[in-house]
């Protein structure tokens, strides 16, 4: 019996629908297989990389182990050498420490000496106006050098000793000569004969005017005061000093001041 066309269309529609569902199901069933293949491929690659890294690490570990052993041996040799050098140089190091201590003490002593030297220099500079004019003029260069702040301690010490030695020498002798002095009672400087009795006394004589002066250290400078009527005695003293008269006792005014 023939199938009507309408029924034929009704049956053919569901068949097409079932065929479509079957094809879709087969397509979805093929996806997990591809995922499994892809995962297996990645696992193979990861495993190969892991094996490569493990092999490289095994080789590197052997090399690092031998390097570490070599470094340990070198460190032990260096430590033995250090201990040997410490033992050998113990005495030298002790001597060096002693020398360093002496050097420190010497530096401190030098600093203290330099401080005292500066104080002594200042005292000697203040002393200059109180020196006899002849001696003060003779020490002009030494005093000028002492005033130089750039002078080294050695130079300063040498200059101080020069001044002190000259003062000591002058103090133990009679010094005679002609000088130009500013004298009390005179209008201006004048040339006179002068004799110094050490650092503490001096006599000036104006032979033409028949005047004499006594010189002594003042509070700020060397000062000259008139000695009325003492010109003959001063002249006799100078003549004896120059071997122009026989030695004799001469009475002449003097002034002694207490030591400061």
Image: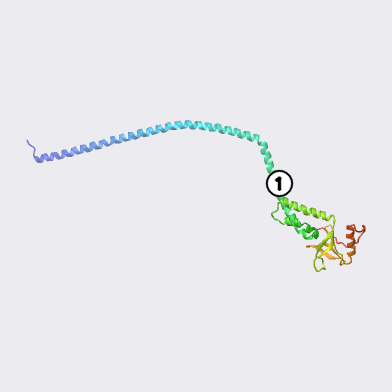
Near mark 1 (Cα within 10 A), the count class, few <14, some 14-19 or many ≥20, is: few
Q: Foreground residue, 33 or 139?
A: 139
Determine whether the residue tagged by mark 1 lies in a helix, strand or loop.
helix
User: Which residue position is annotated with label 1?
Assistant: 106
Among the 4 quarters of the image, the one containing residue 44? top left
The residue sitting at 45% across, 31% down in the picture is 59
Residue 63 rendering spot, x and y as whole percentages: 48, 31
Up the image or down, 29 lies above or below 256; here it is above
Q: Considering depth in this image, is 196 or 25 the residue closer to the camera?
A: 196
213 sits to left or right of 101: right
Residue 187 left/right relative to 35 = right
At x 89%, y 60%, the residue is 239
Q: Is residue 50 in view?
A: yes
From the viewer's side, name the closer residue of 20 and 1: 20
- Which quadrant of the figure contains the C terminus? bottom right
Quadrant of the drawing holding the N terminus:
top left
């Amino acid at each position: 019996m023939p199938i009507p066309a309408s029924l034929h269309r009704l049956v053919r529609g569901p068949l097409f629908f079932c065929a479509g569902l079957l094809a879709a199901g087969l397509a979805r069933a093929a996806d997990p297989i591809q995922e499994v293949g892809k995962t297996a491929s990645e696992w193979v690659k990861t495993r190969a990389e892991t094996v490569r890294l493990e092999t490289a690490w095994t080789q590197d570990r052997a090399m690092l182990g031998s390097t570490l052993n070599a470094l340990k041996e070198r460190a032990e040799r260096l430590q033995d050498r250090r201990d040997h050098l410490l033992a050998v140089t113990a005495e030298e190091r002790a001597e060096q420490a002693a020398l360093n201590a002496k050097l420190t003490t010497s530096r401190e002593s030098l600093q203290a000496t330099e401080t005292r030297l500066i104080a002594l220099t200042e005292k000697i500079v203040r002393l200059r106006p109180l020196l006899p004019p002849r001696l003060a003029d003779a020490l002009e260069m030494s005093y000028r050098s002492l005033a130089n702040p750039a002078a080294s301690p050695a130079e300063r010490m040498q200059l101080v000793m020069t001044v002190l030695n000259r003062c000591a020498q002058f103090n133990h002798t009679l010094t005679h000569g002609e000088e130009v002095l500013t004298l009390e009672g005179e209008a201006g400087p004048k040339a006179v004969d002068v004799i110094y009795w050490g650092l503490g006394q001096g006599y000036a004589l104006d032979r033409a005017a028949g005047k004499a002066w006594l010189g002594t250290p003042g509070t700020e400078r060397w000062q000259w005061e008139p000695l009325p009527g003492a010109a003959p005695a001063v002249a006799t003293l100078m003549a004896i000093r120059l071997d122009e008269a026989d030695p004799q006792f001469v009475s002449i005014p003097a002034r002694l001041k207490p030591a400061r």
